[in-house]
Image (cartoon, rainbow, N blue to C red):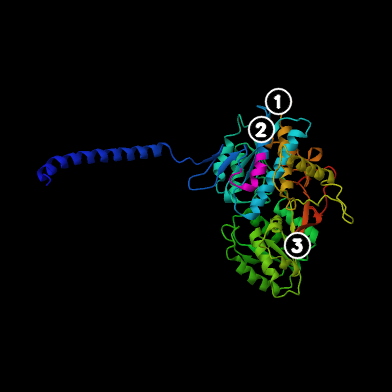
Amino acid sequence: MPNRLRYRVFYTARQKVVTSVITLAVTVGATLYVVDTVNDPEDRSCAPGVARPQGSTECVGVNGTGHDFGVPALREVATAIARENATLGSGDHVTVAILLPITSTDTGMSGKVLHELQGAYAQQYRANHESNDQKPRIRLVLANTGKGNAHWRTTVDQLKTMTGAPDQLRAVSGVATSSTEIRDAVTELTKSGVAVVGTTITADDIANGPGRNRYPGLARVSPTNGDEARALAAFGKVDAAKAILVQDTRTGDHYTDTLKSAFAASLKGKAPYEPQLFTSPADMTEEGTTANTFRQITHLICDTTAETVFFAGRHTQLRQFINALGARGCKSRAFTVLTGDEGSYLGGDKKLDRAALRAKVTVRYASLAHPDAWKPVPGRPVPTTGGSTAAYDTFVTTLARAARAPSGPIGPIALADGQSIVAYDAMATAVHAIRQATPTGSTLPELRDVGAQWPQVKGSLRVEGASGWICLDNYGNPYNKAVPIVELALDGSQRFVQMAWPEGHPPNDNCLPPGKG
């Protein structure tokens, strides 16, 4: 039988000591773990210059070493850019950043990002290999602002630290959406002296003008919404008495706000009907419930004598409206829908009901560029001014060369939406300004001198863009830029119809903007 006294006095005491030692060890270990965790937080890096912000799974930041930001479709073009960057020597180049929502999950935006990067890279390749060895050479980096540009500030703050050695950032291009976030990003960059060249920003209020210089150093290569509306009106010769406006009531989206203002101005005092209203979701790439609203609006349009519908809204809602119009009750009547450059997304939108296009619905939009715009065909000669077949052919040749090994491949190339063409032209404009601002005998320009070049990009100093001549006024806005009118064909392809001009005719030979006085 065990000795109960011995167990209670000796063994129990020993057990208590052992237990105390174990408890102390566990406590110290836990404390060290906590301290170690605080001192060594989770590694949120993705690649050089890129990390996941707290509370986000997106990789945000700036990179030119081949990182694809977790988007497999961008792997080839990101790698091609990295290869080109690796050929640059120390001190012989400057950096241009392409600022885009690279990790957007919206299908239309994802395609746009790929195409813009391809176009920008093609111009980088041309600048470094096919410009008679001009200096400085160009390093290209990808700058991701995240889905919906939600992390624009993180990325812009990073870009602002890159204006000195070794990066020598001298311009930012891309800047492709007319949103509040992009407006704020442009404000911050230009305030810091960084030149900005917008590709597809078309909002009239993200621009400089007489008496307003909110964005010193900003240039754009695309016409404003106001210019697009004027070009559409000049092309379509719309009878305002047989037209109606369908517009988004949501404010704060500069593309939609300025487009509906431009359309309303063209119909002012002439349209017999008040606008038909809808309200898009806060995230305009989401479906929301607007399809229900459009079903009702099409009933009301059938109650009118309208033949033309001006649509002021983003591409998701545009697609919903077209689908609803195709299912309208008055199918015996034909309708033409006219809209801005968001129509370029429709060609790749798998949710578009192609049957709507066979139900006497014609969809035409003001494109920013189109691969057939400068190709002569019988009965449709190329304009003698405002652009040229030679400039477009140079783009096609350069893109093909850049896409081949050892530089490429750069992924599947699609030109119908015009995004690659415009990005190529924006990059060409940035390179033009960088080299014009570089003093003789110097290797690189002063930061603020690049954006100071925009008033001189005109006349014989214009940029011979693949989308048309880029002649900037004193405020960095394109003057009388060519506007291809594109129609969505029955098979969903995007068919070039005719060139239109904000002034109603092509520019003259010298392409000098007239005085405003």
Circle 1 SS class: loop
Give the residue type at disc 2.
Answer: Ala
Q: Position of residue 52 (x, y in %)?
A: 52, 44
Q: Main secondary structure of the magenta part?
A: helix
| Mark 1 residue crowding within 10 angstroms, few (<14) / some (14–19) / many (20+) | few
Image coords of residue 368 (percent x, y): 74, 51
Q: Quadrant of residue 456?
A: top right
Nearer to us in this view, 429 or 50:
50
Residue highlighted by disc 3: 491
Stretch of the chain drawn in magenta? 68-79
Q: Tell me if residue 74 is in the magenta stretch.
A: yes
First-in-chain label (3 vs 1) = 1
Q: Secondary structure at mark 3?
A: loop
Residue 422 magenta-highlighted: no
Sequence-wise, which precedes: disc 3 or disc 2? Answer: 2
Which of labels 3 and 1 is toward the front?
A: 3
Mark 3 touches mark 1? (CB < 8 Å)? no
Answer whether labels 3 and 2 touch (C-beta < 8 Å).
Answer: no
Whole-percent x, y for residue 169 in the image? 63, 34
C-beta proximity under 8 Å, tags 2 and 1: no
Q: Which residue is mark 1?
A: 442
User: Residue 225: which quarter of the image?
Assistant: bottom right
Does 330 appear above or below 116? below
Asked if residue 504 is positioned above or below residue 477 in the image, the reply reads: below
* Residue drawn at the location 40% of the way across and 39% of the way down: 37
Which residue: 75% across, 37% down?
126
* Amino acid type for the residue under numbered disc 1: Ser
Q: CA distance from mark 3 to mark 1?
A: 54 Å
Q: Is residue 216 left or right of residue 488?
A: left
Location of residue 348 (image quadrant): bottom right
**What residue would you read off at disc 2?**
86
Question: Label 2: how many residues lie within 10 Å, few (<14), some (14-19) or many (20+)?
Answer: few
